[in-house]
Image: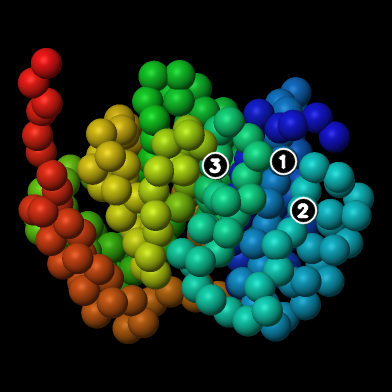
């Protein structure tokens, strides 16, 4: 099979009902493009593995990486990134809240930027999730000296050569824009659509991520303060 230009990486955990409609949405959005889709099954227990096998059998540019047990979103993204063969890489959630139709707009910006982040300007989530995300984003930007409006949006696009320079640790997918900037890469945000979840349940809530995310934020703050800055004189 011809090497793809674009790799779409989709971590998923117990999203069996979303696989087929997501696949159809990607097929529609990516018509005429040379691409691959990499589903990373993060130890699902709801029949997602069977659904993925059925879908990928019918569409040869879709493939799956299966984890033996649940390892978390960062691990799933890292595995997908390392397996990606395209010059450009896109990450997105499997819950149908991201719209694959936004992917071409993100890819277009990679002509001049190294990373493009989706900005869910109009969030379609429960009010408690919207408020907690707003507060978390404010604190994250304040402590890390950042100005990213929506670092929690999984819909992002990257140049693969730049992505190869980034080493991820557990939880660090939340700080990919900052990690890119620390390597001297350029980052921009683009407004994307956001839909309410139709099937399944959110795997990440306030209680299971707030404390860990804050600890990760302190690590990022430390890294930025300790980054080496020097110029070699000719």
Mark 3 lies on a secondary structure that is strand
Give the side of residue 163 with respect to residue 53, left or right. left
The answer to whether the residues at label 3 and label 1 have Cβ atoms under 8 Å apart is: no
Query: Which residue does the numbered mark 2 point to in the structure image?
Result: 63
Q: Residue at x 58, y 31 (%)?
A: 87
Q: Earlier in the sequence, mark 2 or mark 1?
A: 1
Residue 106 visible in the snapshot: yes
Query: Which residue does the numbered mark 3 point to in the structure image?
Result: 90
Q: Position of residue 176 (x, y in %)?
A: 35, 50
In the picture as drawn, the residue positioned furthest to the front comes out as 234
Q: Earlier in the sequence, mark 3 or mark 2?
A: 2
Label 2 to label 1: alpha-carbon separation: 8 Å
Q: Position of residue 128 (x, y in %)?
A: 31, 72
Q: Nearer the viewer, residue 229 or 171?
A: 229
Quarter of the image for residue 45 reads: bottom right
Residue 122 visible in the snapshot: no
Query: Which residue does the numbered mark 1 point to in the structure image?
Result: 36
Q: Earlier in the sequence, mark 3 or mark 1?
A: 1
Rendered view: 189 above or below 73: above
The answer to whether the residues at label 2 and label 1 have Cβ atoms under 8 Å apart is: yes
Label 3 to label 1: alpha-carbon separation: 10 Å
Give the side of residue 139 with respect to residue 181, left or right. left
Q: Quadrant of the C terminus?
A: top left
Q: Position of residue 113 (x, y in %)?
A: 37, 25
Rendered view: 17 above or below 37: below
Q: Quadrant of the N terminus?
A: top right
Q: Position of residue 78 (x, y in %)?
A: 51, 58
Mark 1 lies on a secondary structure that is strand
Q: Residue at x 66, y 73 (%)?
A: 67
Mark 2 lies on a secondary structure that is strand
Q: Residues within 10 Å of mark 1 (few under 14, many from 20)?
A: many
């Amino acid at each position: 099979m011809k090497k793809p230009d674009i790799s779409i990486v989709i971590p998923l955990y117990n999203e069996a009902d979303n696989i087929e409609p997501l696949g159809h949405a990607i097929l529609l959005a990516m018509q005429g493009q040379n691409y691959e889709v990499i589903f990373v099954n993060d130890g699902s227990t709801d029949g997602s593995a069977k659904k993925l096998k059925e879908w990928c059998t019918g569409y040869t540019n879709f493939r799956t990486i299966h984890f033996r047990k649940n390892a978390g979103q960062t691990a799933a993204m890292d595995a997908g990134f390392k397996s990606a063969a395209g010059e450009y890489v896109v990450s997105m959630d499997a819950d149908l809240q991201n719209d694959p139709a936004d992917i071409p707009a993100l890819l277009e910006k990679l002509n001049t930027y190294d990373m493009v982040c989706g900005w869910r300007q109009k969030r379609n989530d429960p009010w408690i999730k919207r408020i907690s995300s707003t507060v978390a984003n404010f604190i994250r930007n304040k402590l890390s000296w950042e100005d990213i409006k929506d670092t929690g949006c999984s819909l992002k696009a990257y140049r693969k050569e730049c992505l190869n320079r980034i080493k991820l640790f557990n939880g660090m997918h939340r700080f990919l824009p900052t990690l890119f900037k620390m390597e001297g890469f350029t980052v921009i945000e683009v407004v994307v659509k956001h839909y309410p979840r139709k099937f399944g349940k959110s795997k990440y809530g306030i209680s299971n991520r707030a404390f860990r995310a804050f600890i990760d934020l302190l690590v990022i703050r430390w890294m930025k303060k300790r980054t080496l800055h020097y110029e070699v004189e000719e």
